[in-house]
Image: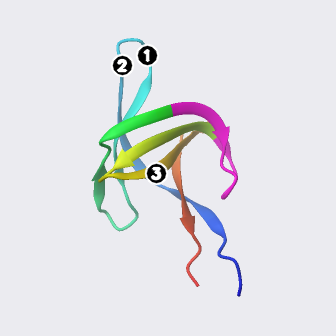
Amino acid sequence: MEEQKNYKVYVDVGAKFSADGKLLPTWIRWIDGHIFEIDRIKQICRAASRKAGGTGLRYTVIISGQESQLYYEENYRWFVEAKQPQ
């Protein structure tokens, strides 16, 4: 059985800046156009994506009760990790 590989999916993200200067994502537009509202941000830290590669700020977010990872790279692009279709 082959292991599924992950890859980056660059997404549109709505975001705002807090009064103290933090960049806070509010929604994600998936590649099919569906918009997912971010219910809560659990954590923000500098980290590498071990599954898809790349580094930057990793936002651990809650969307519809599910935890997800959203990355903001130093090239000013947002991405999420997705499994390669078989």
* Residue 57 in the image: above or below residue 54: above
Q: CA distance from mark 1 to mark 2?
A: 5 Å
Q: CA distance from mark 1 to mark 3?
A: 23 Å
* Residue 53 in the image: above or below residue 82: above
Q: Which range is magenta?
A: 44-55
- Mark 1 crowdedness (10 Å alpha carbons): few <14, some 14-19, many ≥20: few
Q: Position of residue 9 (x, y in %)?
A: 53, 60
Q: Residue at x 32, y 52 (%)?
A: 65
Q: Residue at x 44, y 21 (%)?
A: 22
Horizontal side of residue 65 vs 7, given as left or right: left
Q: Which residue is mark 3?
A: 68
Q: Which residue is mark 2?
A: 18
Q: Which residue is mark 1?
A: 21
Horizontal side of residue 85 vs 51, given as left or right: left
Q: CA distance from mark 2 to mark 3?
A: 21 Å
Q: Mark 1 and 2 residues: CB-CB less than 8 Å, in contact?
A: yes
Specify the amino acid type for callout 1. Gly
Q: Position of residue 19 (x, y in %)?
A: 35, 13
- Mark 2 crowdedness (10 Å alpha carbons): few <14, some 14-19, many ≥20: few
* Residue 57 in the image: above or below residue 85: above
Q: For the view shown, which residue lies furthest in the front direction?
A: 65
Horizontal side of residue 76 vs 3, given as left or right: left
Front-most of 56 and 44? 44
